Image: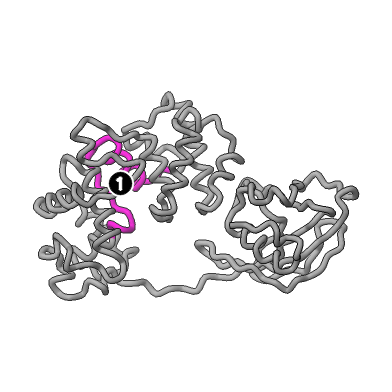
Amino acid sequence: MALISKILLRWYVKNGRVLPWRVSPKDSESGQTPDPYKVWVSEIMLQQTTVKTVIPYFQKFIEKWGCIDKLSHANEGEVLAFWAGLGYYARGRNLLRCAKELRDRFNSKIPNDKKKLLSLPGIGEYTASAIRSIAFGEKEVVVDANIERVICRLFKIERPIKQSKKDIKECASQLFPEFHSGDLAQALMDFANSICKPKKPFCAQCPISRSCLSFKYGVVENIPAKPIKKNKPIRKGYVFFVTLKPNKFLLERRPSKGILGGLLGFPTTKWDVEKNDLSFPFEANWFYTGSVVTHQFSHFKLELEIVFGETEYSKFDNSKYLVFERQNFDLLSLPTLMRKVYSQAKIYDATLNSNSVT
């Protein structure tokens, strides 16, 4: 297994991706060391999100909050507004909570100790291992979803990944060396991205194909085994698109706990298995559009029917809601669901067409 590790590390030196949070092996030789803060932020952002999507968010995030101390003094609304579009907003909330604890408990420094890392909000086994290996050069067995695929194929682990976690970790531990485990983790990530792809892997270009049991037996594309997909439950509700004449509209800040917690959005009813009888949130001229916005969350599918409301701004008095100028809509950081609502609402309100959302 040591030979496989050496081959992958050599491959990484030549083919590793250049990423804004990463210090390459060549840079390491010249004395550069990874910034634990950047490693931590990148690992949180990369959870269930692609590298391509994360890079511009990461760069802007570091420009705004370049260190733990700066981040720790941000407010939640500001961080969540920045997070809009990345999804899984609990990550943003936990990132801020963690920064405050790092400031208060560890003098705004990320600890190397595994137990201390695991005591922090939003840091689990994988993230703690990644931080220790990549940022501090400690020996850790780092296994994310992409590395799991490589290990399953290399060792011909034929069961679905969820049923094979223990075996995958044991097999992966045979690869990780005493030194350079962070480089090997990043090598495996890049190798999974460019060679050992989920579909149509480039086995002809694979430097370790001779050691790959799945390749030997011709079953690479069948491994890891795909679990039987279950249909996601559907939740339903209404979303209120309210215009205040002549040129304003309403948003609300969602409760801090729960899905899309703390984010701006159009008012909605509760999301239930069946749509409840509709009760309007306040007095206005209401009409149904029949238009339904659909959105996929990790554990369920959401269907929201758009209901239009219209009233005079001079007559509106409800402190629960936030009033915005239509011309400023593009400047707002809204989650993807709410941007879908706006885009679909344009079909039913011609006056929105001059305010497109990209």
Q: Quadrant of residue 229?
A: bottom left
Q: Compared with residue 166, is residue 64 higher up or lower down, i.e. above or below?
A: above
Number of numbered labels in the structure image: 1
- Coordinates of residue 84 in the picture (x, y in percent): 56, 50
Residue found at x 40% / y 55%: 50
Choose between 238 and 167: the one closer to the eye. Answer: 238
On the image, the x and y values in percent for residue 215 come to: 16, 70
Quarter of the picture containing the N terminus is bottom left
Residue sitting at x 75%, y 52%: 250
* Residue occupied by mark 1: 18
Which corner quadrant holds the C terminus? bottom right
Residue visible at 19% across and 47% down?
13
Where disc 1 sits, the SS reads loop
For the magenta stretch, what is the residue range? 123-148
Determine if residue 311 is in view.
yes
Amino acid carrying mark 1 in the image: Val
Q: Position of residue 165 (x, y in %)?
A: 30, 59
Q: Is residue 269 visible?
A: no
Is residue 72 shown left or right of residue 17? right
